[in-house]
Image (cartoon, rainbow, N blue to C red):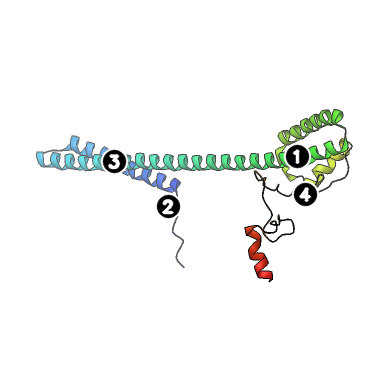
Amino acid sequence: MQPAQPTLTPERIDAMLAAVAEVCMEGVTEAQVWIKAAEDVEAFERASRALQTHCRNLRQTIAMKQRFDREQAALKAGASRAAEAERKEIAKARKSAVSGLYWRARTHLGEMVWNEYEENHAEEIFNDLDQCLSELSTEDPDAFLATPFEDLIDRFSEEFGLGPFNPDPKPPPEPEPPPRPRQKGYDPPPPGSRYAKQPAPGSPSAEPALRSSA
C-alpha cells in the first residue's frame, strides 16, 4: 500500500518555497567560489553563468513566495469580511426578533392593563410595565427570546396584578355595516307601487288604464 501523499497546505507550500530558496542560495555561494578559483577565461565564464542561473532561480522563488503571501493575506481578509458580514446579519436578525417579541408583548399587556384598571391608573401602570419589559429585552436579549410568549405574559401579569394569560384580551369589535349612500332630492317610488301617485280620473295618463280595464 502506497503512503498517502502529503497535502499541499499553506504551511507546507511555505516550507517548500523556503527550502527551494535555500538551495538556490547555496548555488549562488558555490558559484561565487568557482568565480574566485577560476584559472582561465572559460572556467570564469562557466562560473558566471552558474551564478546567473542560481540568482535568477532565487529571484523567481522569492517572487513566488511574495505572491503566495499576498494570496494568503487576501484569502484571510476575505474570510474575515465574510465572517463580519455573517456576524452583522445574525445580530440584525436577533435585534429584529427581540424587537418583534417586545412590541407583541407590549401591545398584549397594554390591552390587558387598560381592561383591568381605570384610565387614571392605567397609564402610570403601563409606563412602569413598559420600562420593565424594555430593560428585560435589552439586558439579556438571548434569555428574552428564549422565554415563551405565554410565560412572558404570565410573568408580567402576576407582577402587575393582571388577569391570567388570554390569547385575545380585547376581541375586535364586529364590523359595522357600510352606510347607505344618500341621494340628493326626492326619489319617486317605482311605477305600479301602491305608494305611487295615481292619475286623476279623466286625465290623459289614466285613459290607457281605463281602456285596458275595459
Q: Which mark is residue 16?
A: none
- Side (left or right) of 73 relative to 137: left
Q: Say if 33 sits above or below 11 in the image.
A: above
Residue 134 location (% of width, % of height): 74, 33
Residue furthest toward the front?
202
Amino acid type for the residue under numbered disc 4: Glu
Residue 139 location (% of width, % of height): 73, 33
Give the number of the mark in front: 2 or 1.
1
Is label 4 in a helix, a strand or a loop? loop
Q: Say if 123 sits above or below 111 in the image.
A: above
Q: Are marks 4 and 3 in contact (CB under 8 Å)?
A: no
First in residue order: circle 4 vs circle 2: 2
Residue pictured at 84% horizontal, 43% vertical: 154
Q: In the picture, which quadrant includes the C terminus?
A: bottom right
**Crowd class of label 2 (few under 14; some 14 to 19; many from 20; radius 10 Å):** few
First in residue order: circle 4 vs circle 3: 3
Amino acid type for the residue under numbered disc 2: Leu
Residue furthest toward the bottom?
214
Q: Is residue 122 visible?
A: yes
Residue under numbered circle 3? 58
Q: Between 154 and 139, which is closer to the camera in this rendering? A: 154
Residue under numbered circle 1? 107
- Side (left or right) of 159 relative to 36: right
Q: Between 175 and 141, which is closer to the camera in this rendering? A: 175
Give the number of the mark in front: 3 or 2.
2
Residue under numbered circle 4? 174
Q: Which mark is residue 8?
A: 2
